[in-house]
Each structure stands twice: as C-alpha cells, then as structure tokens.
Image (cartoon, grey):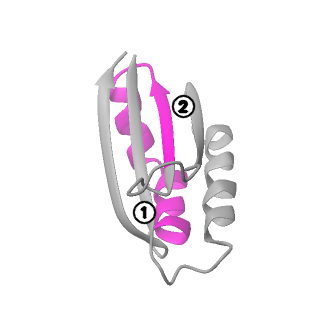
Amino acid sequence: MLRHVVMFRFREEAPPDARDSVEAGLADLPSEIEEIESYRFGADLGLRDGNFDYCLVADFADEEAFARYVDHPAHQRFIAERLAPVVAERVSVQYTV
C-alpha cells in the first residue's frame, strides 16, 4: 500500500471561505476516483507555530493506482479550480505502508 501525505499553506490573501472550498472539494474526490482507498484531511489545530494550514493523507493500492489518481480529471480539476488559486506552498511525500 502507498500512502500520500500533502500539506498546504494558504496565501495570506486567500478569501475566508478558502478552507471550506478546499475541504468540500476534497470530500468529493473519493466518490469520483475509485483508486482512493482511504482519504483523510483536515485543518491544522494551531498548536505549534510554523505548522502548515492543512493536511491530506490518502492511501492507494500501489504506485499505479496513485499515478491514476494524480492524472484523474477530477483531481486535476480540483487542483486548478480550488487549490491553486489559494495555496502559497505545498509539500508532499509518498511512502509504503
């Protein structure tokens, strides 16, 4: 199993509802992309300075399933329409579980 972890830092000028829009978009993806086996996400609790604002943890059967997710039109649409306009910084890692 492959785990994909992504963290986002929102732009300072992002509208107040940006997180809600990102969260709504993420909530839709598992029903549109069958390769997603587990999909959890949420906003940082603000317990430590310097943390990223938002995190996503997703599981896939293997590298091929992950590649199909990355290229899936629903995922690409989510990035272009909801994520790219409001995210200042993104980091990710993939590892075997």
Above or below residue 95? Residue 79 is below
Q: Say which element carries label 2.
A: loop
Q: Quadrant of the C terminus?
A: top left
In the image, residue 78 lies in the stretch drawn in magenta: yes
Residue drawn where x is 63% and y is 38% of the image: 30
Q: Say which element carries label 1.
A: strand
Q: CA distance from mark 2 to mark 1?
A: 23 Å
Residue found at the very far bottom of the displayed protein: 13
In the image, residue 95 lies in the stretch drawn in magenta: no
Decide: few, some or many residues near mark 1? Use Cα within 10 Å; few <14, some 14-19, many ≥20. some
The circle drawn on residue 9 is 1
What residue range appears in magenta?
55-83
How far across and how far down the image is residue 39, in percent?
Answer: 58, 34
Above or below residue 80? Residue 42 is above
Main secondary structure type of the part rendered in magenta: helix
The circle drawn on residue 36 is 2
Disc 1 marks a residue whose amino acid type is Arg
How far across and how far down the image is residue 64, in percent?
Answer: 34, 28
How far across and how far down the image is residue 48, in percent?
Answer: 46, 50
Residue 8 or residue 70, whichever sits in front: 8
Disc 2 marks a residue whose amino acid type is Ile
Counting residues from the start of the chain, the first of labels 2 and 1 encountered is 1
Above or below residue 97? Residue 15 is below
